[in-house]
Image (tube, rainbow, N blue to C red):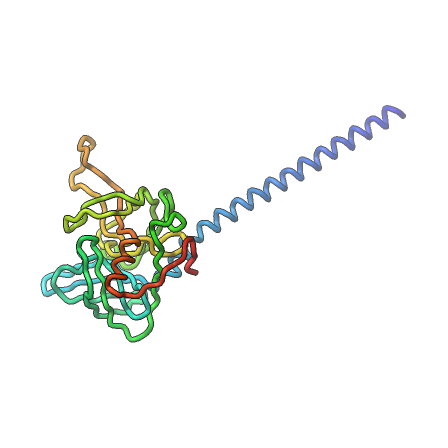
Amino acid sequence: MRNKKIMIVCLALVACIIVLALAGCVLFREREAERVVVTADDASTGRLVAANNMPAALRVFVESATSRVSGSGFYVNKDGYAVTNAHVVDSSGSIYVEDYEGGTHSARVLYSDASIDIAVLKVDVAVEQSFMKIADSEDPANMYCGDVVYFIGNPSNLGLLMSSALVSSSEVYLKNQSGHTQKSILLDGDVNHGNSGGALLNKNGAVVGVIYGRMENNSASSTQKDDIYGLGTAVPSKDLMEFLRACNVDYTLAGAGESVW
């Protein structure tokens, strides 16, 4: 009889251990599920950035009788003022833009500064436009080394596309296309010809820079020390805002860490 009671107690203990183990597995699965949800939620950031900023992005064209130059740009206010690179619109010819929905509008250069490679366009539009908010690139709440950022542009004239990158450095000094040395944001993303003038956006969807080029070398060799690949460059939004203020062009400031949606 005593042995029978001991057997029952042992069986009860084994049952408890099994129940606890199963509960632990359930909790582990729940935690794993939570991790998956967080990862998926993080992945949706890019979709939010695209959805809220594509309507304000532009393809920029300069067309003459013999050539057509293509680049990128974006609206900075509802009245049709847009930003692009100075080098995109410095050639002779008529300027026009194409928006995300395929609408085309003529444009003209109002202000241009080759030293920071920024130009302001006035686009001939008849209705209020979507526009992008601008954040101070020097505030760590808006952009920091190692952050994931996004840029919208017209690479190789394929249409408005969005890409992503990491901020490799928020402050390097490089020579731009016109030969001026300027403060730049360095990115580890694939910036291509045609991305010039496109908006660089943080995870909150605010503009923290303007893409203006990439570091490259035309030769390919394992021994040539000057070969550099996969590094893009952008004008910091701090310089963009100063230029817009000097030109009396209105823009909307995004608060530190503020989401635009």
Residue at 25% x, 56% y is: 197
* Residue 221 screen position, x and y as percent: 18, 34
**98 relative to 15 in the view: left or right:** left
Report the residue that reaches farthest toward the left. Answer: 66
Quadrant for the C terminus, please. Answer: bottom left
Residue at 88% x, 24% y is: 2
Q: Is residue 146 above or below residue 225?
A: below
Numbered label tally: 0
Front position in the image: 4 or 228:
228
Report the residue that reaches farthest toward the bottom. Answer: 126
* Residue 63 screen position, x and y as percent: 15, 64
Residue at 13% x, 65% y is: 93
**211 relative to 136 in the view: left or right:** left
Front position in the image: 39 or 167:
167
**212 relative to 200 in the view: left or right:** left
Report the residue that reaches farthest toward the top. Answer: 3
Front position in the image: 69 or 236:
236
* Residue 201 screen position, x and y as percent: 35, 54
Residue at 14% x, 48% y is: 179
* Residue 155 screen position, x and y as percent: 25, 54
Quadrant for the N terminus, please. Answer: top right
| Quarter occupied by residue 17 | top right
Report the residue that reaches farthest toward the right. Answer: 1
